[in-house]
Structure formats: C-alpha cells, structure tokens
Image: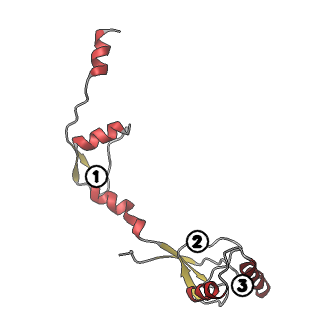
Amino acid sequence: MPAGLRAASNRVMEFQDKILKCVDCGKDFIFTAGEQLFFHDKQFHNDPKRCKACKLKRGGGSSVRAETRTHCSVCGQETTVPFRPTQGRPVLCRSCFEQNRRTSGTQPGSAETQSVVAAMAQTGNSATVAESPVEAEPAG
C-alpha cells in the first residue's frame, strides 16, 4: 500500500465549531465539534439546516393531539375523537363509550359492537362521518 493512502486512512478527523445560518429564522447558530463528530459517526452527509429553537418548533408538535370532529354512532351527538375514524366502525361519544364499557365489557369487534353498526345501517346513521380535524390544546 502506498504511504500516502496509509497516512490518509490513519488520519484522525478533527472538527471545529462552524457557524451556520438557519433556513427558517435566518439567525446564525453554532454547529459544534461534538455535533459534527456525532453526524460523522452516524454517517450523516449534510450539515443541519435549522437552529435548535426552529427544530423544536418544527418537530415539537408531538404534545398536541389532532382530534377529529364526528357524530356518535349511538346517540348522534357531535363529539371529537383522538383518531381518524375508519369506514364501517362505530364511533362513540365519551358518555356512550363509558356506558357501553360499564354495561357490557365487550371488546371492539364483538357481537354487540357489530349489532350497533347493523342498527346504524338500518337507521341511515354513518359510523364514521369525519367532519373536520380539530387541534387539541397541548397536554401540560
């Protein structure tokens, strides 16, 4: 092996702090030597584009749950649920859900739940009419 290649392969990478500009807010931020070493170890090829504050704003939505506004399959009352309803599955408001859980103790997909869906089909109620997503308040 030529001496030049051996020297290059044994060379220890030295990192120095870099000043980068955030693409969102335009402010300068420091990409530290430690962060660069982490990026190198993880084989990330691009430098970060956002400062820590903008990263938190962009990815910090995990504490906010998106809720969907719909109507209860049993009583017809408007309600919000913390999921996107799927076709053919009943959606219950909190009071009907609690009442169903207390009285029957049945699991989703049980004969009783399926009878609710069948009853809705006869009355023309839709089990999963998702009207509009609603942003919930942050959990805190």
Q: To which residue does mark 1 refer?
A: 22
Left/right of residue 125 with respect to residue 15 in the rendered view:
right
Report how far apart the C-alphas of labels 2 and 3 lie in the structure: 18 Å
Task: Give the mark, 1 or 2, whose residue is nearer the N terminus.
Answer: 1
The residue at the far right in this view is 122
The amino acid on which the numbered mark 2 sits, given as a three-letter code, is Arg
Task: Give the mark, 2 or 3, whose residue is nearer the N terminus.
Answer: 2
Task: Give the mark, 1 or 3, whose residue is nearer the N terminus.
Answer: 1
* Above/below status of 12 relative to 53: above
Report how far apart the C-alphas of labels 1 and 2 lie in the structure: 34 Å
Q: Residue 84: which disc?
A: 2
Q: Residue at x 61, y 76 (%)?
A: 130
Residue toward you, 31 or 62: 62
The amino acid on which the numbered mark 1 sits, given as a three-letter code, is Cys
* Above/below status of 45 relative to 49: above
Q: To which residue does mark 3 refer?
A: 125
Report how far apart the C-alphas of labels 1 and 3 lie in the structure: 51 Å
* Kind of element beneath mark 2: loop
The picture quadrant where one finds residue 3 is top left
